[in-house]
Image (spheres, rainbow, N blue to C red):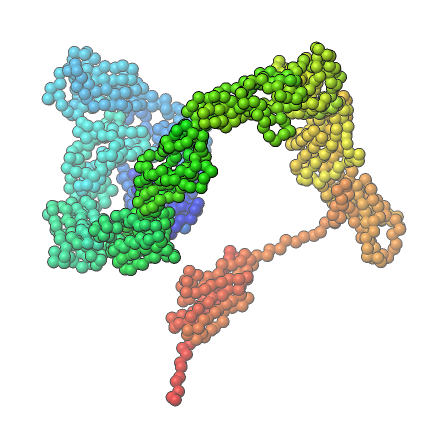
């Protein structure tokens, strides 16, 4: 929402969003790096630097808490585009500049702000003397000493940025001087790190160690205990011992005693860096205390101690360092009594201490902080309660003795107002035992001027009485065709939306659906229910406070559906038949109790009931059957609601045997055929007494019995005829079903395999097929019989295996092999076959290649163009159709060299295409296509010229040396050097005719003499450049041009006019303005802008500015003014509007 507070990525920054919704791709402003608090010596320069982000980029402004910042010489703001930093500079800091400064970043969608403190140190400070030689006083033009201090402690990559801040650009001299100063400091201490607290080792010695690098190995190292010098040695048996291992120094104390407890310090000569002792800090409990330490030389970090305990940058303590590394700050967060004591800062080897006193309040910056008094430990929070239930609001303050007051919508509450007010130490509670609608309000708790508010919302969601709900959830069972009804009372806040659902589908009033809903009850009635209506019935009640659902079940009972088939025959014996089935798909809503079995003998119309069997049985055995009879059965399912339709079986034979296996031909001759078969698996319950063998002659429609005895030799046949045979088994009940017929067999004597084919040849071929032809093999009586078919086999050259192309023999003496790979070599052979077997194969003497007959490459197009002109930037496309076998290698050349990578070549079996998608003049040249295969070579040349409309030649100059002639001369067209076919054309127009006529064409020079020039006439000449693409614009002599400034200040074409408008009617005032650039128009009434006032409709169409008042009232009177402004000036006009009151007179009747 507009005005909401947002979280910033940087601590200490406040971001306020000023619009309700920020558009996609835009953002509120924020600080990516906020300015740092500064402690600056009086007379020095102070720089605050900030980096901001946001879309659109925010505008940065600066303010201070006390005083103004209007003096541009005292406060300078700028933006450093290189470092993307907004800078506030105070060139010479004075004591009155000490203040809290504010930085604001603002764009269209919000504002980000932060506070920065500037502390001013007195100009005269105490500096600890060092051994190095003091620098002479700075003269005008010399480098600021502070620059050297920053460079000596900064990283090399930051040198350039620091120098630019101080205005130094001679980097080479500066680096030489910097290296010299570093050598001068080699006798000073460099680094002290990894200091650990004293620990008692298992050997009984107390040790602490540190990493320390000494530039001067002869520097003296001193050990202090509580500020007193302690003697030590390198002997491990001495009381105090110092051992060195590389840069590691270890101090130990032998057999420590209680008097050895204290604060130990290490001191190395010539390392004093503190410039001022930091002052005592005063803080209020639960607030922060700040210690600040100022150094004379930059250090990355110093050591902070409380007593003998080192302080680290953790949640309790915050340690910060300024950008110049001269100001080190320790912040103790959330102070309490345990934080009292002495705090130490160790930089180099000089220590400074201060006491932290727990009382009221001065920070180092002299900001007075008042006592907080009672504070809320936890405030009230918004609470939601249901109607009739208990609600509680509670808070906790910092004092257990302070009493407070409760308010409801600003009215004081007591226990007599139907609430309970309870105080338990620092906790205060307000309890409402039975919430009502009027308890919805804003509740406030006050204690000693502190306030906390929260809203109590009373909700009344849908509710259902438990007894009514229990009755509703019971299943409703009805018979098919009857009516089912549900009724459910409810309560809850209005409006209440009630919906009925059936299996997740919403029910709406219809022919068989009746829904009646009142304020506290809803009823559903389903008429003429069917089995498909069974399922879950759900009622859903919803209001603004919640949703309630209740589910019931509808069961519609009916007679079952028929049992499921097919019926499986379990047994078919001489005296019994047994079969089984599957239960019904739908049991009708209640269990199947029985199955009713009925039987009918095939050939009769009467159905006989065989009785009922229990519903759990899904099979039936009929033992009262006659051998050889066939029966049909009907099965019905029965439940409490009725009997289903029947399931009918196929005809079942009693005692007939099953089918034998299909007969097999053992041998065949012209006068007899020998057969065998297997006995049936099902004997029908009795012994197999014989078989019936039947034959079927091809071309007839009936089966004839061979003999009833079942011989395996069939002699009643005709030579050359084709026959099929089948067999059926016979038992005491009779003959069963016949078997499957055997394969067709021809009555003839066995044959000999045929011989080799003759005359094998290749008739045609292409890339995927080979067409073959051959002659029949000759029949030799007694050794080789006639061929009845042929097989064609192929074998790729690289494969040892032959593959048959036809699975069944072919009778023709020709065949086409399909599906070959182009240009692949194959071995091919043909095998003759008959009933006696396959003959010997006949193959080609050499392999065959899958390709058309060899053809020399040639182009198929008769009229092929040899010259193509294309406009620069258009597509060049050359297509050539050809024929060749085998497929030729296609190559393209441009002026004898391969075409460039930007040229696309597409080849197919019958043609080739060259494509240049976007042509340039450099593509001009002679393109050659070459076709080459095993048979020959063919090529064709095309000249492609890529050009454009020529640019016009230069201005035409006229020179008349000989009377009656005029010599024209002109400058060459810029395209002449790039186009060798460019030439010029001259046209003439005289004053007597007024038409242009061509005088000369195909001129390749820049001069031409026109004859037949008549005195007294006026002639005009034009010179065109001309190429294969067309004509250029005609040449033109130079024309004089004058620049003109079209900009103009704003002015009124038609000003506003005085108007008197009747009250209650609309009033429109308008004016016409002009100006370049178009001026910005602003409307005012009594010097108040109306552009954002929605009571006025303002338009600006093509310089006509209008303001419309839809309904004029008395308060609309006043001076209306239009101000127009652009960069060249400003103009305004005004008028007075006096709404006129209309008086209505009523005449007596």
Residue 951, picture quadrant: top right
Q: Residue at x 19, y 54 (%)?
A: 388
Q: Residue at x 58, y 17 (%)?
A: 713
Q: Is residue 932 visible?
A: no
- Image quarter in which the C terminus is found: bottom left
x and y percent of residue 501 in the render?
A: 34, 50
Residue 354, picture quadrant: top left
Q: Nearer the viewer, residue 1055 or 380?
A: 380
The answer to whether residue 813 is above or below residue 615 is above
Q: Residue at x 67, y 13 (%)?
A: 752
Q: Residue at x 37, y 55 (%)?
A: 512
Q: Residue furthest top?
A: 783
Residue 76, picture quadrant: top left
The answer to whether residue 1 is above or below residue 239 is below
Q: Is residue 55 visible?
A: yes
x and y percent of residue 340 in the render?
A: 16, 35
Q: Nearer the viewer, residue 762 or 417?
A: 762
x and y percent of residue 1146 in the render?
A: 39, 85
């Amino acid at each position: 929402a507009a005005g909401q507070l947002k979280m910033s990525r940087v601590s200490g920054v406040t971001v306020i969003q000023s619009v309700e919704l920020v558009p996609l791709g835009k953002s509120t402003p924020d600080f990516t790096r906020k300015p740092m608090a500064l402690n600056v010596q009086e007379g020095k320069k102070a720089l605050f630097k900030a980096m901001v982000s946001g879309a659109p980029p925010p505008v940065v402004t600066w303010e201070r808490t006390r005083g103004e910042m209007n003096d541009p010489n005292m406060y300078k703001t700028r933006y450093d585009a290189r470092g993307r930093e907004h800078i506030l500079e105070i060139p010479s800091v004075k004591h009155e500049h000490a203040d809290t400064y504010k930085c604001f970043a603002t764009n269209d969608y919000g504002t980000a702000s932060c506070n920065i403190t500037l502390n001013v140190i007195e100009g005269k400070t105490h500096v600890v003397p060092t051994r190095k030689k003091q620098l002479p006083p700075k003269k005008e033009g010399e480098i600021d000493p502070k620059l050297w201090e920053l460079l000596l402690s900064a990283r090399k990559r930051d040198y350039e940025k620091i120098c630019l801040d101080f205005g130094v650009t001679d980097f080479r001299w500066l680096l030489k001087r910097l290296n010299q100063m570093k050598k001068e400091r080699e006798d000073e201490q460099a680094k002290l790190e990894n200091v650990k607290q004293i620990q008692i080792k298992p050997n009984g010695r107390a040790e602490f160690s540190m990493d320390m690098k000494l530039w001067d190995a002869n520097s003296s190292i001193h050990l202090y205990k509580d500020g007193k010098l302690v003697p030590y040695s390198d002997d491990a048996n001495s009381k105090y011992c110092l051992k060195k291992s590389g840069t590691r120094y270890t101090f130990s104390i032998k057999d420590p005693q209680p008097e050895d407890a204290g604060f130990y310090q290490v001191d190395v000569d010539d390392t004093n860096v503190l410039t001022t002792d930091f002052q005592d800090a005063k803080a209020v409990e639960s607030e922060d205390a700040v210690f600040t330490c100022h150094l004379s030389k930059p250090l990355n970090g110093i050591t902070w101690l409380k007593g003998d305990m080192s302080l680290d940058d953790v949640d309790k303590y915050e340690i910060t360092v300024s950008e110049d590394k001269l100001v080190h700050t320790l912040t103790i967060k959330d102070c309490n009594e345990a934080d009292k004591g002495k705090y130490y800062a160790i930089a180099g080897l000089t220590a400074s201490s201060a006491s932290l006193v727990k009382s009221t309040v001065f920070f180092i910056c002299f900001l007075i902080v008042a006592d907080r008094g009672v504070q809320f430990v936890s405030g009230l929070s918004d609470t939601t309660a249901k109607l009739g239930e208990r609600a509680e609001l509670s808070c906790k303050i910092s004092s257990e003795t302070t009493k407070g007051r409760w308010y409801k919508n600003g009215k004081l509450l007591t226990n007599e107002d139907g609430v309970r007010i309870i105080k338990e130490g620092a906790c205060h509670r307000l309890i409402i035992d039975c919430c009502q609608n009027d308890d919805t309000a804003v509740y406030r708790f006050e204690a000693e001027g502190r306030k906390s508010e929260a809203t109590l919302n009373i909700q009344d969601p849908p509710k259902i009485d438990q007894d009514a709900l229990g009755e509703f959830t019971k299943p409703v069972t009805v018979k098919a065709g009857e009516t089912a009804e549900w009724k459910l009372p409810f309560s809850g806040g209005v409006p209440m939306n009630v919906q009925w659902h059936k299996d997740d589908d919403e029910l709406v009033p219809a022919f068989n659906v009746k829904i009646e809903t009142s304020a506290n009850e809803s009823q559903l009635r389903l008429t003429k229910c069917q089995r498909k209506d069974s399922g879950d019935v759900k009622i859903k009640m919803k209001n603004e406070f919640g949703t309630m659902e209740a589910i019931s079940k509808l069961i519609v009972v009916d007679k079952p559906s028929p049992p499921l088939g097919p019926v499986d025959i379990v047994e078919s014996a001489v005296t019994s038949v047994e079969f089984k089935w599957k239960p019904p798909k739908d049991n009708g809503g209640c269990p199947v109790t029985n199955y009713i079995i009925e039987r009918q003998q095939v050939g009769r119309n009467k159905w006989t009931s065989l009785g009922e069997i229990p519903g759990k049985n899904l099979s039936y055995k009929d033992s009262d059957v006659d051998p050889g009879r066939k029966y049909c059965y009907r099965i019905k399912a029965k439940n409490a609601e009725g009997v289903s339709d029947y399931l009918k079986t196929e005809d079942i034979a009693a005692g007939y045997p099953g089918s034998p296996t299909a007969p097999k031909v053992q041998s065949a001759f012209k006068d007899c055929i020998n057969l065998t078969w297997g006995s049936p698996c099902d004997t029908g319950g009795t012994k197999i007494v014989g078989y019936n063998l039947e034959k079927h002659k091809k071309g007839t429609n009936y089966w004839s019995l061979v003999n009833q005895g079942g011989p395996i030799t069939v002699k009643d046949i005709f030579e050359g005829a084709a026959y099929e045979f089948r067999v059926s088994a016979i038992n005491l009940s009779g003959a069963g079903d016949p078997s499957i017929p055997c394969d067709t067999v021809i009555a003839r004597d066995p044959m000999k395999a045929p011989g080799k084919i003759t005359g094998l040849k290749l008739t045609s071929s292409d890339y995927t097929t080979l067409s073959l032809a051959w002659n029949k093999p000759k029949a030799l009586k007694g050794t080789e019989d006639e061929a009845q078919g042929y097989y064609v086999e192929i074998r790729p050259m690289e494969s040892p295996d032959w593959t048959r192309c036809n699975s069944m023999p072919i009778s023709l003496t020709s065949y086409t092999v399909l599906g070959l790979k182009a240009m692949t070599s194959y071995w091919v052979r043909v095998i003759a076959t008959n009933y006696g077997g396959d003959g010997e194969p006949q193959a080609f003497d050499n392999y065959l290649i899958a390709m058309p007959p060899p053809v020399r490459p040639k182009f198929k197009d008769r009229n092929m163009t040899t010259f193509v002109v294309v406009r620069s930037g258009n597509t060049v496309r050359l297509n050539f159709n050809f024929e060749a076998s085998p497929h030729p290698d296609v190559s393209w050349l441009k002026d004898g060299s391969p075409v460039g990578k930007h040229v696309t070549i597409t080849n197919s079996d019958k043609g080739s295409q060259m494509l240049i998608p976007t042509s340039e003049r450099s593509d001009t040249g002679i393109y050659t296509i070459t076709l080459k295969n095993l048979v020959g070579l063919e090529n064709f040349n095309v000249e492609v010229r890529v050009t454009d409309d020529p640019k016009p030649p230069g201005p035409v100059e006229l020179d008349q040396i000989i009377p009656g002639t005029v010599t024209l001369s002109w400058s060459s067209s810029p395209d002449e050097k790039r186009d060798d076919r460019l030439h010029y054309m001259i046209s003439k127009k005289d004053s007597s005719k007024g038409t242009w006529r061509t005088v000369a064409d195909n001129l390749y020079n820049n001069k031409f003499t026109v004859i037949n020039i008549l005195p007294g006439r006026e002639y005009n000449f034009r010179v065109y450049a001309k190429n294969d693409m067309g004509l250029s614009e005609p040449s033109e002599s130079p024309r004089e041009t004058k620049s003109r400034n079209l900009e103009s200040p704003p002015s009124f074409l038609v000003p506003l006019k005085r108007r008197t408008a009747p009250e209650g009617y609309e009033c429109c005032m308008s004016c016409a303005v002009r100006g370049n650039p178009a001026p910005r128009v602003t409307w005012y009434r009594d010097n108040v802008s109306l552009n954002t006032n929605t009571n006025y409709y303002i338009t600006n169409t093509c310089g006509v500015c209008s303001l419309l008042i839809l309904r004029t009232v008395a308060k609309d009177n006043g001076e209306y003014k239009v101000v127009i402004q652009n960069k060249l000036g400003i103009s305004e006009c005004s008028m007075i509007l006096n709404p006129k009151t209309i008086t209505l007179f009523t005449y007596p009747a």
